[in-house]
Image (spheres, rainbow, N blue to C red):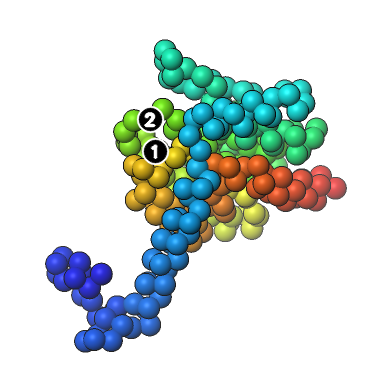
Amino acid sequence: IAAIYKKNKLDISKIVIGDHITDYGQLLLSYLKDRAYGLNSLAPKLLMIKEEAKTEYEKLLPIRSYSCPQPMNKQKGNKRAKSYFTCMINMLIETEINSIPCNYDPKNLLIFTDQNKPFYVLSRRVDGAFPTIIDPISIWEIKEYYNTTTFCSRVADGIYETLLDGLEINEMQKVSNRKIFHYLFIDDFNTWWNMGKSYLCRIFDLIHMGLVDEVIFGREIFKDIPRITKRWEEEYVIRNQ
């Protein structure tokens, strides 16, 4: 780290003084080690390839009758198929929230109100909102990239979109003193692990910057969606008492 600082003619005194690593330098090293451990030990085990996602999707299909959207991907030819990860997220959420409303495919921007008047609108559409796009309790983005052969700018843009959403949500929460649960779901082993490790680092940083509540990797949806939806339901009951 000191060598890179020196190469770019940056002041290293905050991290190293002589042969001594400062407290801030120790904190920086600890964070980088924790990030490396978290990503190396978890991401390869949790991220799925398309065939695995398809298998898991087909396991869910016969469990119950679903009314939530099960969209197709935007690819063509023999790559055209269900958006397996998105479909499973929708199906799992529907199973957990029972008859509570949920917008699985918002077509409009999120609106937050104060005294029954709109006072804040987010800049982007999101992939899901619970229960509605007006004063949502929870919102989420889904980044699944099965069949992707290169780490294109569209994938990188997904990180910055989540960053923007997080900044706006934090600003809105300060003004309104309300909590909005903000999630990012990602999957595809090849895209995120083989080609996009540097962006996994950015995702790890987003969590610690407080710009997203949780990032849920691949297989984690099966244990984490039942857990997080309980929090949504509790908040829903409180708001509707």
Question: Residue 112: where, in percent of width, then height?
Answer: 62, 43
Find residue 148 and name its label: 2
Q: What residue type is labelled 1?
A: Thr
Q: In front: 111, or 88?
A: 88
In the image, what residue occupies the spot 75% across and 28% down? 63
- Distance from label 1 to label 2 (Cα)? 7 Å
Residue 172 can be seen, yes or no: no
18, above or below 191, in the image:
below
Q: Which amino acid does label 2 sit on?
A: Thr
**Is 156 positioned to the left or the right of 13 in the image?**
right
Where on the picture, by quarter, is residue 175? bottom right
Rendered position, 90 above or below 228: above
- Please give the label number shown on residue 191: 1
Q: Are marks 1 and 2 in contact (CB under 8 Å)?
A: yes
- Residue 48 numbered tag: none
User: Can you see residue 33?
Assistant: yes
